[in-house]
Amino acid sequence: MALVVLAFSSCQLGKHYARPELNLPQQLDSTEQDTLSIADRQWWELYTDTTLQALIERTLEYNKDMKIAAAIEKMTDFYKGNIHDIYHFLKVWAFAKNIGEAEGLDPKTQETLEMAAVVHDIACPLCRDG
């Protein structure tokens, strides 16, 4: 029994923990509000590495799928959550994409077709006011 007590009493793994002194205010000022939001920034601005930012910029500039995705994102914002309009332009885009691919369009014409399909109702106020 003495051996067990001796074995457990010698199991100290480190120094005795001492809580650090923190100089914190007693109360937070609730009148101040942080006006910065991560939603106000583009997703690629979160990365600070200049090489990575250059690669992202180049990809966005030359990648057709990323251009179409960016246009879809902007049109989704443009329609302000109107599910009918969002579903409509996505359906038109999907049909145009499939038809263009089935017809074997060259890449630039395919990109133009898809972009036109995404934004086809942007200048149609009757489409939104009805």
Image (spheres, grey):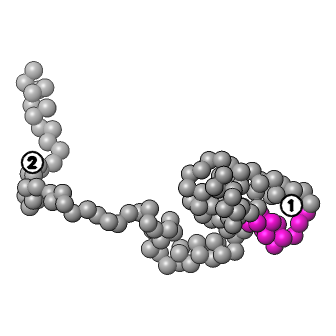
Name the quadrant containing residue 121: bottom right
Kind of residue indicated by mark 1? Gly
Q: Residue at x 7, y 55 (%)?
A: 26
Left or right: where 113 falls relative to 17 = right
Name the quadrant containing residue 22: bottom left
- Whether residue 79 is visible, yes or no, is yes
Q: Position of residue 55 (x, y in %)?
A: 59, 75
124 or 107, which is in the foreground?
A: 124
Q: Residue at x 11, y 38 (%)?
A: 10
Q: Position of residue 3 (x, y in %)?
A: 11, 26
Magenta segment range? 104-116
52 or 35, which is in the foreground?
A: 35
130 or 15, which is in the foreground?
A: 130
The residue tagged 1 is 100
Which label number is shown at residue 86? none
Magenta stretch holds residue 1: no
Q: Residues within 10 Å of mark 2 (few under 14, many from 20)?
A: few
Q: Residue at x 11, y 59 (%)?
A: 24
Q: Calculate the distance from the C-alpha at mark 1 to the C-alpha at mark 2.
A: 71 Å
Which-is-in-front pick, marks 1 and 2? 1
Q: Earlier in the sequence, mark 1 or mark 2?
A: 2
104 or 13, which is in the foreground?
A: 104
- Whether residue 73 is visible, yes or no, is no
Number of marks in picture: 2
Magenta stretch holds residue 114: yes
Outermost residue toward the top? 1
Kind of residue indicated by mark 2? His
What is the quadrant of the N terminus in the image?
top left
Which label number is shown at residue 16? 2
Local secondary structure at mark 1: helix
Left or right: where 36 falls relative to 21 = right
